[in-house]
Amino acid sequence: EKGGFAHFMLKEIHEQPDSLRNAIRGRLDFNLGSSVLSGMGTSPRDLAEIQRVVLVGCGTSLHAGLVGEYAFEDMADIHSEVQQAAEFRYRNPIIGSRDLVVAISQSGETADTLAAVREANQKGAFVMGLCNVVGSTIARETGRGVYLHAGPEISVASTKAFTCQVAVMLMMALKLGRGRRFSRDEGMKFAKAIEAIPELVQKVIEQSDRIEAIAARYAENEHAFFIGRGPMYPVALEGALKLKEISYIHAEGYHAAELKHGPIALLQEGTPVIALANDIPGKDKTLGNVEECRARGARILGIITEGDHEAAEAMDDVIEIPACHPLVSTIPAAVALQLLAYHIANVRGCEIDQPRNLAKSVTVE
Ligand code: F6R
């Protein structure tokens, strides 16, 4: 059932080109330069009414929401924010009929996310589900939304759900954007960028053996830092979460600019810093932060754009991802970090599919 892979996690990492193809299939409209997401159940008029997008979720789904936030602001020119689902439900959120609340949940059963859906429904918001499991409670209670079509995710550590969640949010942002400032031309370009995602991910997966060799050099450490900025900041958070949950290495994700406000005090000779330094706006600043870490003796693993010699020179080790749109690049970068976490955990002999203290679905608050 693991299809020849040692663990479900590895199988699901490898499935991503296919699951992403399934998530994208039939949903891009190259004539209109837009996307077709009929499950959203919104007319262009409904979409024009929306003033704010509020994304709620937990864990990895929360991190996907943080990437989505950039997409909605950037593509759709619409105020967007992310809230941890438990926080959302208890803080008496200010929302109403012109807010689109998107509940992000692979399982569709996470208790806090479900409670957030009920709260948003109560307040009359436009509520949508972004679920993988068809017919799950959140999918049913939202009544509208977009399924991921990622296929069953068995591994406790979420992988393909994350990348499909991001891909679907990029398509949602494209659709909302086309109702606003985004031109047909820009829309077509972005649709093409989305269409290329499965191929980009395939190129990262082909480097699995190389990543395994790199992982062996980082597997002895008990602490690690992940840094990024812009849409790569949530990817840093997600990379740190993957590493800590399956390898039990203490890993922290930080905004690259935040390190010098405190956490840099923890860097010692050989402390791993995984820097998301691919070619997006702000890359030079991140390279500056990398330099600061290196000056404290950190060992730097850079996730960089293929062929970027300047970035490569700043690093001790590199994993390359193909050049692509900055928002799209979050997906291949996340896959690189999934493989890194997997191989590190494997070297450490961890129970990858059944990490201690964790369950696949968190149905208590
Ligand atoms: C991490 C992980 C969890 C889930 C979280 C939300 O790898 O799997 O952080 O992402 O429990 O689960 P869903 O998306 O099912 O609501």
Image (cartoon, rainbow, N blue to C red):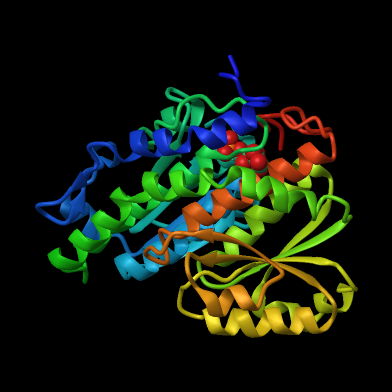
Q: Residue 236 location in percent, x, y?
A: 63, 61
Q: Residue 19 location in percent, x, y?
A: 42, 34
Residue sitting nearer the eye, 280 or 81: 280
> Which quarter of the rendered image does ligand 1 occupy?
top right
Quarter occupied by the C terminus? top right
Q: Residue 168 location in percent, x, y?
A: 37, 46
**Residue ID at (24%, 55%):** 192
Above or below 18: residue 152: above
Extreme-top residue of the structure: 1
Judge whether residue 124 can be spotted in this image. no
| Image side of residue 83 versus residue 299, left or right | left
Quarter occupied by the N terminus? top right
**Residue ID at (41%, 51%):** 200
Residue sitting nearer the eye, 31 or 199: 199
Judge whether residue 322 can be spotted in this image. yes
Residue sitting nearer the eye, 261 or 350: 350
Residue sitting nearer the eye, 191 or 95: 191
**Residue ID at (36%, 32%):** 143
Extreme-left residue of the structure: 31
Above or below 90: residue 232: below
Q: Residue 266 location in percent, x, y?
A: 88, 73
Count of picture labels: 0
Q: Residue 47 sits in which quadrant?
A: bottom left
**Residue ID at (19%, 54%):** 34
Above or below 127: residue 76: below
| Image side of residue 74 versus residue 153, left or right | left
Above or below 192: residue 359: above
